[in-house]
Amino acid sequence: MLIKKILCPVDLGEHSPEVAKYAVAIASAMKAEVEILYVAPSFEEYATFQTPADLVFGLVETITAEAHARLNAFVSEHFKDVPTSAQIVNGYVADEILKEAEKLPADLIIMATHGRRGLDRLVFGSVAEKVIKASLVPVMTIRPE
């Protein structure tokens, strides 16, 4: 299988560097390009709360603006040796990952799984599981320790 485009969604959390190592290793071996994707929350995610719309818009704008600086620094530090592009989108994480994979089109998705269980999983769900079930391309999940 020829892999030319890898989609690497990150949450910029403590495990993102480990996922980046896998993406860089595979991209280097396959001479592939990596698209790094950060999904920021959208207005709709907060619409169910009894919060004034202008406050929600301000919060989403602040999160997105801060994410740009963090994402740029992350890409500069962890993706030095492979061709990359990076972007931030707003929306529901799993949905946006799947949309971007189709739009690229990606040949492979490399992402973290946090291994949530019990109530945590019930409340937050599993983004990785949703992506795996709906993706039209292979998904490699990394479960950092």
Image: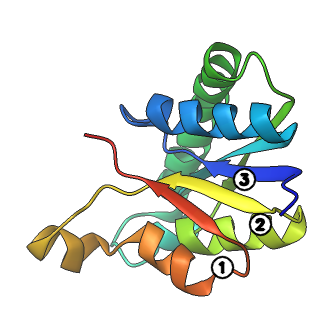
Decide if residue 42 is in sight here.
no
Q: Earlier in the sequence, mark 2 or mark 1?
A: 2
CB of mark 1 within 8 Å of CB of mark 3? no
Residue position marked by numbered label 1 in the rendering: 135
CB of mark 3 within 8 Å of CB of mark 2? yes
| Depicted 55 relative to depicted 63: above or below | below
Q: Amino acid at mark 2?
A: Ala
Counting the numbered discs, the total is 3
CB of mark 2 within 8 Å of CB of mark 1? yes
In the image, 111: left or right of 37? left
Front residue of 3 and 86: 3
Q: Secondary structure at mark 3?
A: strand
Q: Quadrant of residue 120?
A: bottom left
| Depicted 109 relative to depicted 134: above or below | above
In percent of width and height, residue 124 lies at 29, 70
Colour setup of the view: rainbow
Q: Quadrant of residue 131?
A: bottom right
Residue position marked by numbered label 3 in the rendering: 7
User: How many neighbours does mark 3 have within 10 angstroms: few (below 14), some (14-19), or many (20 or more)?
Assistant: many
